[in-house]
Structures are given as structure tokens and as C-alpha cells.
Image: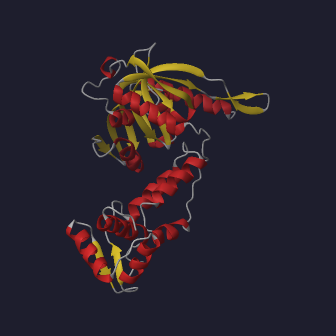
Amino acid sequence: MQKGHPGKIRILALLELLDQWTDEEHPLSAQELIAFLSEQGITAERKTIYRDISALRAHGIDILFTRKPKAGYFLAERRFELPEVRLLMDAVYAAPFLTQKKTGELLQKLSGLMSAGQAEETAGMPHINLRPKFKNEEIYYTIDAVSRAIAQKKKISFLYRHHVIRGNRMTRDEGRKFLVSPYALIWDSDKYYLAANYEKYGDISVYRLDRMRRAVLSAQDARPFCEVSEYRERFDAEDYAAKTFHLYHGDLQTVALRCSDSALELLLDKFGAGLRICTREDGLFDVKIQVYAGEGLVEWLLQYGDRICVLSPQALREQVCERIHRIEKQYGF
């Protein structure tokens, strides 16, 4: 047993044992706790265990005694409940910008938020991810560098790479160097983006983090976002994501749509409960939304076919019609 403050060491070790090994289905008796402590070179008696548990309870630690499935103590309340940890683990599985290696490392850390029994049960549960994982092992360093740049209001430089075809082989190009003023990290459609201003232009651009390499914090001050966006007090990433489609930028416009009733859930998923219906008749309803009307909006509209139709502006109607004609031509109509 370590010298100095044996009582304090013992009670901390006891709390760690309860945290790591116990839950409602896996309690430990006083004798088992004594045995665990003994393996760490810490001596204890039953009265000592009871006294230490009483002290932990007095400090607000939720330790309960149960007789089923066997008599013993368990930690009843954790910082994260089991369903919360499972949700986090599923999110890690589903995030394609996390490589297989980083996915494994994160899952291992998340399993430490559960008891050993819960972690063992969770390890045997199937997790289905239909999306391939990307292979950029720099992703953690990129997120860290970008986060620090946003917090310190500094510019950040990086190489931005794309896939290209050379011969019959797909590969990545050498990358183009960017120096941008970063404003927000946005997770959209299972991809992680940086919303930023490229120094040559007066608007917002987005960059996928999995395509970024060699991200380096610059000593240059970032350009204020109020100079390149509608936001003044703070960069509203949630509002920006709601007004863009696949984070494609465009001109901010008021768009009128005529929608079938079957499209209501689709619109609510995108624009939230604040959506307002202008008119309603014969299974159709009209709405007006303020969005960035660009290529991303056209692609979003086309996927819903005749369920959503653009009423105005006329230029957007023509843009959608032109894309439909090009698709018809592609298929020989």
C-alpha cells in the first residue's frame, strides 16, 4: 500500500473499481471489493468498505446496494448513461471522415465510459455502416488546427486535394494551397466541413476536412465574418447550414415552392418547425423560404421530382428546367 494518505488512496481506488466494474447487472460484494483492492496492494476490511461507501454517498456519488442478480454494490449514476454512450458510438461508426484506425481508437475510449460488463455486451452488438471510411489519418490534427484558428480568430493554411483519374487509375492530385479565414465547423450529410472566407473573394466558401492536408495555424488575423456574410454578432452555423444545400453557396434569395402534401416531412427535416405555409389547396401547399439559390438547391429540388415545384424566382425555374432537359437528352428523350 502506498504511504502518505492511505485512506484517501483507498477511497479513490474504491470509486475507480465501482466505476470500472459495476452496474445494476454486475454488483460487487464487500468481500469482492476487498479482494480487488488487495490486488492493488491496498488493505481494507468490511467496516472500512462500508465507511468509505458511506463517505462517497455523502459526497453525492450514487452507489446502491442490490440483492439481485446477487448481493453487492454498484455505481447507479454515471456521467453518461448507457444509451447515451451507445448513441455516441453509433455516430462514430457512421462518420465516414473518421478512418478505421481513428474509429477504433475512439470506440475504445468511449467504452471506458461504461462498466466492463456493459462494454463487453456492447462489443458483441452489430453496427451497420453502409458508407466507406475515408483514409485521411490527419483528420484529428486538422480538426485541432481549425478549432484553434477559429478560437484565436487567425487564418489557417492547408493543401486541398481532390480525386482525379490518371489513365485507368483513381488517385489524388497534389493539392492546391489555400489561406482562409475560418468561422465554423459544420457536420452536414455525414461529412465535416469548414465554413471560411478565401482571401480573394467576398463570400463564404466551404471545405471538406477529409480533403485537407497540412493544416497550419497562421499568424495573420482572420477577416471578420461580418464583412463576408449577413451575420453580425456571431457566425450562425446552424442558420447557414439550413439555408444552403449540400453547403453549396449562391445568392441569398426568397424562393416560392409549390409542394405536394407528401413533401411536408422533407421540408420540415430541412427547414425545421419554423416553416410557414402560405396557401393550401387540393393536396398542395405553397411555402416561401429564404435560401442560397445555387447549384446545390437545384440538385436538392430534382431529387424530389414532381413533389416540389419552383414558383419563383423565374431564373431558378429556368435553371431547374434546363437541368431536366439535359437529363432527358442524356437518356435519349
Say which quarter of the image contains residue 145: top left
Q: Position of residue 133 (x, y in %)?
A: 60, 46
Say whether residue 246 is visible: no
Q: Residue at x 39, y 77 (%)?
A: 33
Q: Residue at x 43, y 78 (%)?
A: 35
Figure check: 104 above or below 227 = below
Say whether residue 39 is visible: yes
Q: Position of residue 190 (x, y in %)?
A: 50, 44
In this view, the residue in front, 39 or 131, is 39
Q: Residue at x 67, y 31 (%)?
A: 330
In this view, the residue in front, 323 or 123, is 123
Q: Position of residue 163 (x, y in %)?
A: 65, 30
Q: Position of residue 288 (x, y in %)?
A: 32, 34
Q: Residue at x 36, y 18 (%)?
A: 223
In the rendered image, the quadrant that contains the N terminus is bottom left
Residue at the left extreme?
A: 58
Figure check: 198 above or below 138 = above
Left or right position of 273 against 156: left
In this view, the residue in front, 172 or 297, is 172
Residue at the front extreme?
A: 3
In the rendered image, the quadrant that contains the C terminus is top right
